[in-house]
């Protein structure tokens, strides 16, 4: 079944954007080894945001790019700290993870 009109474009991408933001912000709530695996790949969820943005632009959606602000902000909050200049941040930072695990 195919939907007609542009009023419904981008809702699937927007849904994936919300789920991605939820995983970025609430990764500690995922139980077991899946949660541990998710925490290991947390910085790479930023690529999911880029792919979703590409799909949203490809479909000429108006909703999805707006919804992608949520996971982009969540990724910046969780993993973007080392990218900012300041004490203890930047390329010379040492540590086991580049994302906030709190």
Image (tube, grey):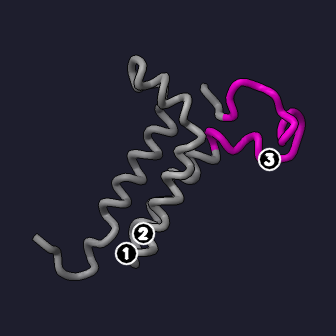
Q: Which mark is residue 84?
A: 3
Residue placed at 63% from the left, 43% from the top?
77
Judged from this view, the residue extending furthest toward the top is 32
Question: What separation in Å lies between label 1 and label 2 (alpha carbons)?
Answer: 5 Å
Residue drawn at x 51%, y 39% as measured from the top left: 24
x and y percentages locating residue 19 in the rendered image: 39, 45
Disc 3 crowd, CA 10 A, few/some/many (<14, 14-19, 20+): few
Q: Is residue 16 above or below residue 78?
A: below
Residue 83 against residue 13 in the figure, above or below: above
**Which labelled disc corresponds to residue 59?**
1
Q: Are marks 1 and 3 in contact (CB under 8 Å)?
A: no
Query: Which segment did they paint magenta?
Result: 77-98
Query: Quadrant location of residue 94?
Result: top right
The answer to if 86 sits in the magenta stretch is yes
Q: Residues within 10 Å of mark 1 (few under 14, many from 20)?
A: some
Residue 72 relative to residue 100: left or right: left
The quadrant of the picture occupied by the N terminus is bottom left
Q: Secondary structure at mark 1?
A: loop
- Percent coordinates x, y for residue 76 in the rendering: 64, 47
Is 91 covered by the magenta stretch?
yes
Which residue does the image show at 47% across and 66% down from the upper left? 66
Q: Give the CA distance from mark 2 to mark 3.
A: 28 Å
Secondary element under disc 2, as helix, strand or loop, is helix
Q: Residues within 10 Å of mark 2 (few under 14, many from 20)?
A: many
| Residue on which the image places disc 2 | 56
């Amino acid at each position: 079944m195919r939907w007609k009109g542009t009023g419904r474009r981008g809702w699937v991408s927007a849904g994936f954007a919300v789920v991605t933001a939820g995983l970025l912000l609430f990764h500690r709530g995922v139980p077991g080894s899946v949660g541990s695996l998710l925490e290991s790949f947390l910085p790479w969820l930023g690529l999911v945001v880029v792919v979703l943005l590409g799909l949203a632009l490809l479909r000429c959606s108006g909703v999805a790019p707006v919804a992608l602000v949520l996971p982009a902000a969540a990724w910046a909050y969780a993993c973007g700290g080392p990218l900012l200049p300041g004490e203890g941040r930047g390329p010379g930072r040492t540590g086991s993870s580049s994302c906030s695990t709190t």
